[in-house]
Image: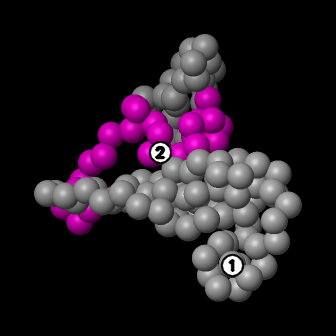
Amino acid sequence: MNLYRINFAHYAPKDREDGIKCLLLAENDEAVYNYVRKLAYWEDYEEVTYVAEEEEFLDGDDEIIEGWYDKQGNPEDFKTRMIRLRGQINDDEHEVSDLYYGTIIYGWELVVENTKVDYSELIAAGIVVKQ
């Protein structure tokens, strides 16, 4: 198991707050992604699919939207991008909008890899979450 720190940034019209949401025990970045996607409502982004012949991303209504590309210029889906970047907090291309009510973005970082420590007491206390 690996120990990850789940970070957040809350944006409001006149303020910003950064913090730690929790510490998470998970097998890998994909497991962390699956945990964070529930917090961040990323399901809408996951429906975006790539259409090779048009080299654009299309949403469910066939509306062309700007696509995501990896460092080599290859198209990538939202899930792959978030796992590679470890969340929207680390995405330089992510623009925060509609701040009237505020918005929260999430990211994560690896704290301890292949930990052998027994975190059962911290899990019971609610300090560490296990995925």
Question: Which residue is denoted by mark 2 in the rendering?
Answer: 88
| Quarter placement of the N terminus | bottom right
Q: Is residue 82 magenta?
A: yes
Task: Establish if 98 lies above or below 64.
Answer: below
Are dots 2 and 1 in contact, CB under 8 Å?
no
Name the residue rendered at 61%, 18% in the picture. Answer: 74
Label 2 element class: helix
Marker disc for residue 122: 1
Name the residue rendered at 76%, 49% in the picture. Answer: 113
Q: Amino acid at mark 1?
A: Leu
Marker disc for residue 32: none
In the rendered image, residue 29, in percent from the top left (x then y), is placed at 70, 48
In the rendered image, residue 41, in percent from the top left (x then y), is placed at 50, 61
Does residue 20 appear left or right of residue 113 in this picture?
left
The image quadrant of residue 93 is top left
Q: Earlier in the sequence, mark 2 or mark 1?
A: 2
Q: Amino acid at mark 2?
A: Gln
Residue count near mark 1 (Cα–Cα under 10 Å), binned few <14, some 14–19, many ≥20: few
In the rendered image, residue 94, in percent from the top left (x then y), is placed at 39, 38
Q: Is residue 22 magenta?
A: no
Magenta segment:
76-103
Label 1 element class: helix
Q: As drawn, which residue projects farthest toward the bottom?
A: 124
Figure coloring: one colour
The image quadrant of residue 69 is top right
Q: As drawn, which residue projects farthest toward the right?
A: 116
Q: As drawn, which residue projects farthest toward the front?
A: 117
Residue 62 visible to the viewer? no
In the rendered image, residue 4, in percent from the top left (x then y), is placed at 65, 56
Instruction: Give the spatial CA distance, label 2 vs label 1.
Output: 27 Å
